[in-house]
Amino acid sequence: MNITYLNQTLRVLLLFVLVFGILYFASAVLIPLTFGMVLSMLLLPVCHWLQSKGMGNGLASILSVVALLVVIGGMLTLLQYQLSDLAEDLSKIEERVNNIVAGLKDYVKQHFGISHREQQKIIKEQQGSTMGQAAGMVTTLISSFAGILVDAILVLVYTFLFIFYRAHFKKFILRLFKPDNRKEAELVLGNAGKVTQSYLGGLGMMIVMLWIMYGIGFTVAGVNNALFFAVLCGVLELVPFAGNITGTSITVLMALAQSGDTRVVVGVLITYGLVQLIQTYLLEPLVVGDRLNINPLFTILIIVIGEAVWGIPGMVLAVPLLGMFKIVCDHCEPLHDYAFLIGPPKEKKAEQGNFILRLFKQKK
């Protein structure tokens, strides 16, 4: 075995450990900064379009952030409208939940011999012991909400600054390289930005399509406030793998609490299955595609690592950050082996594709 090659590999692995350690301990600073960087890449085409209409860099940067706020505000308004309708059904939901609890009490009495009075006594004891915990949870939620609000403001400020000073930051990065390597570094920066924009833009389009499909499916299934749950399932798609399962589980539980009709639950599950089929075999290849060119194993692995390092924000940011890292590995000779490992098998690239699209191809 080549000792020099082994030492080089160990140094690279040690660098990875050091980087993840810094990411973990500096999460409070780096999470808003990273969100600002990724969102600035997404909004760059908007800024360029505004500048092509004769606007200055400052005004175009501000309007790009305002456009983002308008989109987020529209989503929040829609959710608030649906939540107001959902609040009107709370009494019915509470009544349904009470009936379920009463049924559980009867089941416990029949099968375990614990009377209703004894069950109520146990419940009161548990409630008394958890009052302090509930107060602590409320305090934690309030402080968490305040932290989220501060982080949201920081993300918007960072997004604006990254867009406004993008040329300055680009020159700084290029100055870190020797003159002979600056063209390659500029190519890496351009490819990283394009891949991130393409992936996030395709993901946004797919989420809108999921809203439509979930909305139609939940409405047909008879779910109350179907639009709210459709938007919820679509937004949770930002968290790969776990998001859509979480959204559907919430919809199923609320459908049970609202009506208790098993046909509604079956309709929700059928909708989920059909949407996942369309998403996997039609939307993802057409809208998102292989724009990041990452092995599915490492996609799942980076999401798990992202959750361990940064929690839910890490799960959202993990995949686009891995895509940017893959581009760096592609253009950095010492990291070519890691780019090969992260990417899909080359011999299978030509075979990949959507089998549904093949049905529409005519044979010669």
Image (spheres, rainbow, N blue to C red):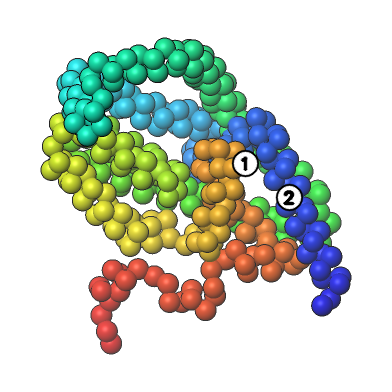
Residue 229 placed where, x, y %?
Answer: 28, 35
Judge the density around disc 1: few (<14), some (14-19), many (≥20) Cα neighbours within 10 Å. some
Judge the density around disc 2: few (<14), some (14-19), many (≥20) Cα neighbours within 10 Å. few
> Label 1: which residue?
309
Check disc 1 and give the amino acid type: Val
Q: Secondary structure at mark 1?
A: helix
Q: Earlier in the sequence, mark 2 or mark 1?
A: 2
- Image vertical order of residue 182 relative to residue 57, above or below: below
Q: Secondary structure at mark 2?
A: helix
Cα separation, mark 2 vs mark 1, equals 12 Å
Identify the image quadrant of residue 179. Answer: bottom right
The quarter in which the C terminus is drawn is bottom left
Tag count:
2
> Label 2: which residue?
17
Q: Residue at x 23, y 21 (%)?
A: 115
Which residue extends farthest right?
4
Residue 88 placed where, x, y %?
Answer: 20, 18
Check disc 2 and give the amino acid type: Val
Q: Residue at x 49, y 40 (%)?
A: 46
Tell me if I can see residue 164 in this picture.
Answer: no
Residue 292 placed where, x, y %?
Answer: 52, 58
